[in-house]
Amino acid sequence: MEQRENMEPYRMLLEGGEGELIEKKSRFIATIRRVESEEEAVSFIEEMKKKYWDATHNCSAFVIGRKAELTRCSDDGEPSQTAGRPMLEVLLGEEIRNIAVVVTRYFGGTLLGTGGLVRAYSGAVKEGLKHCRIAAMRYGVRLKIQTDYNGIGKIQYLLGKKNIPIEKADYTDVVVIQVLLAKEDAAGLKKEITEATNGRAELEEMEELYYIDKEERL
């Protein structure tokens, strides 16, 4: 079993997207993709550099691992700390994992200054995130519940009240169902089910895991 500090919720990129902004005639294109490893991230960055070979800069950042174990960023020729770092800070601030972003810049002829570059690159990432599918991940437990036909109605009522969907149900001489819920809610649910069925329900925690709690829009 994992320790409590390792069970914190986080966000996972489900599907990448693109966003764009114009700042003093400079064009900033953010391309965001889901990556599972440093190799995938590097490959994606190289792919974007080839696609936008004529761009002034292709700056990048990525975050890999549930606890952001691996992070990298590149200014790709922009002044130090004005592109890659601000881009990475957006990803870390939103607590999104397994994500890589490349912001492509086509220079518009006007210098933006240090502050302007930071705002433009971080703003492009935020614009790109608006077009991505992102999931809130939560640490939970898969619970198997076995009961008789007298108890299933009471259990279904409790689950419905708590908005806990039934993953799987088998109806034979007894009823066996599986549910997935937040780890911190499991003890309370088991107590309520035991009380509602007068102790006739059999409860078993099958596994603990992270699961998609809900999709979010940034």
Image: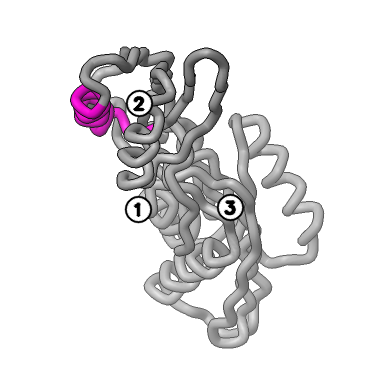
Identity of the residue drawn at 35% across and 32% down = 155
Q: Is residue 15 above or below residue 104?
A: above
One can see residue 5 in this view = no
Quarter of the N terminus within the rendering = top left
The rendered magenta stretch, by its main secondary structure, is classed as: helix
Which residue position is annotated with label 1? 93
What amino acid type should be assigned to the residue bearing mark 3?
Val
Q: Is residue 115 above or below residue 165?
A: below
| Foreground disc of the pair 3, 2 | 2
Classify residue 188 by image quadrant. top left
* In the displayed structure image, the side of residue 189 where residue 26 appears, left or right: right
- Circles 1, 3 touching at the beta carbon (< 8 Å): no
Give the CA distance from mark 3 to mark 2: 51 Å
Which residue position is annotated with label 3? 101
- Could you say whether the residue bearing mark 3 is in a helix, strand or loop? strand
- Could you say whether the residue bearing mark 1 is in a helix, strand or loop? helix
Q: Magenta residues?
A: 181-196
Asked whether 187 falls inside the magenta stretch, the response is yes
Asked whether 134 falls inside the magenta stretch, the response is no
- Work out whether residue 184 or residue 76 is closer to the camera in this orientation and state it: 184
- Work out whether residue 36 or residue 83 is closer to the camera in this orientation and state it: 36
Give the CA distance from mark 1 to mark 3: 14 Å
